Amino acid sequence: MGFLISVRINYRICHNNKLLATIIYKNLFPKDFSKFQLGIGFINEIFSKKSSLIQDIIEKIEKQISNLEKQLEDSEIETLNSVNELDALFLKNPTDGFYTVNEKKESDFENRSDFIAAIKNNSFDVKQATYTSGYYSSELKTTLSAKNISGIFEELKDKKEYLVKLNNLNNKESTKRTNLINKKEELKLRMEKVYSESMSDVLLSSEIDLNDFINKLECDENLIKSPYFDLIIFIVREGLIDENYTDYLTYFYENNLNIEDKEFLRGIYDRRPKEWTYSLTNFDRITTELSVEELIRFKVLNLDLSIFYIENMDKYDSEVTAIFNVIRNSESSVYILDIYERFKEEKKLLNFFGILESKCSYVNKWHIFF
């Protein structure tokens, strides 16, 4: 029972937080929120990229797995068995002599790796034997000088080939090899789970550069300039608005848009407008979504909407002016004729002609059609 109560409390907290985030979004960005309800706008732009983000994550994980597999394969075929053997392979003798350690030459050891081990055990202190010729004789003499060659060993690590083989040697060690195999399996599981992750999880994943992702999104300039722009990113990143946002939209409008009206508005914003005979229903809501500037910018032509504006011109005078500007710029006599036919059927021609005359300086251009 206690567990169920805890689940219910957590659900309510989560639900309330999401509702609060949606209210904040609506009040700070009312225009984008309106688009958000239509399945467009900035937040929906983020959600629309989820599949491509997941694909990016998958590709990066696949590269990591491929890299681990190569490390395992390279360690298997590595012929060297110790760092001493590696150092023996890369350490060069002096060009004019040789090293000795504890009075022993390299030839006094069973193999070169044992000689390297003896140098390391002696804190890299050696004597360098240098060949010199006598002043009065051509016979070579050997001069011994004490030297610490730890720096020479350090310089080996500057060689790419050396580091590759050193990494292979490290990976041959059983614990490291087990870790590589486990990491590979973890990445495979991660790759399987990423498809079911929420957008919040995707944005928070280590494979995604959030700032780079946001900068590449199409976004209204006014939205970017807003001092609260980062709040939108926070809301989505923390899952306060997620893919199930439609569960909360019913709190904001009792009379919501139907599918047809949403498709009409979405077509406008996507610059793929419906034909002008497309039937609309909820004019009160549609008119709240479209500003005068958008009517002109998107060249909105819809017979149902135009008739509604004209019939309610006392409230939508600016919108009617905008519509006739769009008609004039489109030079569409067919559209104006279709409006005329609608008013003709409803015996409202006198009203129509009055509006046409007041809004169109080119009214004489149309007299031949009536």
Image (cartoon, rainbow, N blue to C red):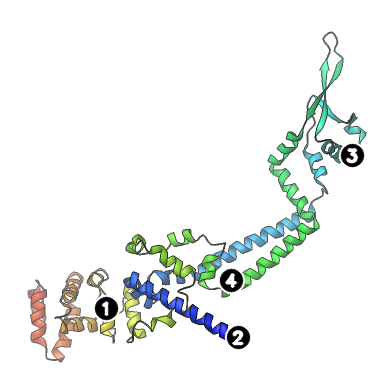
Q: 10 Å neighbourhood of mark 2: few (<14), some, or many (≥20)?
A: few
The disc at residue 288 is 1
Which is nearer the eye, 76 or 275?
Answer: 76
The local secondary structure at tag 4 comes to helix
Marks 4 and 2 sit apart, C-alpha to C-alpha, by: 32 Å
Q: Earlier in the sequence, mark 4 or mark 2?
A: 2
Tag 4 and tag 3, C-beta contact below 8 Å: no
- Which residue type carries mark 3? Asn
Q: Which one is earlier in the sequence, the residue at label 2 or at label 1?
A: 2
* Local secondary structure at mark 1: helix
Kindly report which numbered mark, 2 or 3, lies closer to the viewer in this rendering: 2
At horizontal 19% and vertical 75% (from top left) the residue drawn is: 319
Residue linked to disc 4? 194
The total number of labels drawn is: 4
Point out the tag, 3 or 1, that comes first from the N-terminus: 3
Q: Is residue 166 left or right of residue 268?
A: right
Among the two numbered marks 4 and 1 on one chain, the one whose residue lies closer to the N terminus: 4
What is the secondary structure assignment of the residue under circle 2? Answer: helix
The label number, if any, that marks residue 111 in the structure image: 3
